[in-house]
């Protein structure tokens, strides 16, 4: 990796190369990998939930690895609402048979509810999965796993 660059592991909106090019035009796609012992879910408010990599033994989250500049990272920080909504963590991933470290954005409050994303957001990620050749079953499972709990009779107003 070139000096002054950082490796970023995208697992949500920026798995879509067109969306990444729009926000970070100098970022360079390095390859694909996965975050082990995590699962993809959607967290947040209804129809505004975003992708997150939650710890989950045995799970995997597909990622695209990007080489980003400081300016790219600043743009990502704004898009990911860092540090108010998300924090940055370092994860180990495989790249060309070697273990490397990459930055990933994780939602700060794991207590944020599981919820459904907007159709636009989900479609952007789905397009990214297709383009990268990722198993879309993982994305569909994330959607199913992120169902909002149904109201019970006790929760409904009188």
Image (cartoon, grey):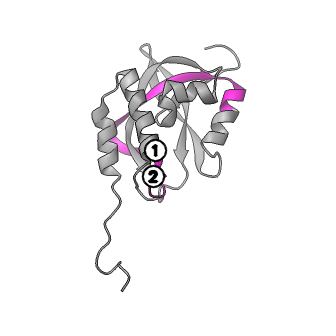
Residue at image x 35%, y 59%? 148
Considering every residue shown, the one lying at the far bottom of the view is: 158
Q: Secondary structure at mark 2?
A: strand
Residue on which the image places disc 2: 43
Residue 46 lies, in percent from the top left, at 44, 58
> Which image quarter: residue 78?
top right
Considering every residue shown, the one lying at the far front of the view is: 120
Residue at image x 31%, y 81%? 154
Q: Which residues are magenta?
A: 44-73
Residue 157 lies, in percent from the top left, at 38, 82
Residue at image x 38%, y 33%? 126
**Is 153 drawn above or below residue 86 in the view shown?**
below
Residue on which the image places disc 1: 52
Residue 87 lies, in percent from the top left, at 59, 45
Confirm whether the magenta stretch covers residue 67: yes
CA neighbours of label 1 inside 10 A, class few (<14), some (14 to 19), many (20+): many
Q: Secondary structure at mark 1?
A: strand
Mark seen at residue 133: none
Confirm whether the magenta stretch covers residue 98: no
């Amino acid at each position: 990796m070139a000096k002054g660059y950082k490796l970023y592991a995208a697992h949500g909106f920026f798995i879509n190369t067109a969306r990444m090019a729009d926000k970070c035009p100098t970022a360079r796609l390095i390859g694909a990998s996965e975050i082990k012992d995590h699962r993809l879910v959607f967290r947040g408010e209804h129809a505004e939930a975003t992708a997150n990599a939650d710890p989950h033994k045995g799970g995997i989250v597909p990622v695209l690895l990007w080489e980003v500049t400081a300016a790219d990272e600043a743009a990502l920080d704004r898009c990911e609402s860092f540090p108010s909504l998300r924090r940055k963590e370092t994860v180990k991933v495989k790249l060309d048979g070697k273990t490397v470290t990459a930055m990933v954005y994780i939602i700060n409050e794991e207590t944020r509810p599981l919820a459904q994303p907007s159709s636009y957001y989900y479609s952007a990620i789905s397009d990214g999965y297709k383009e990268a050749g990722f198993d879309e079953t993982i994305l569909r499972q994330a959607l199913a796993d992120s169902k909002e709990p149904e109201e019970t009779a006790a929760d409904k107003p009188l």
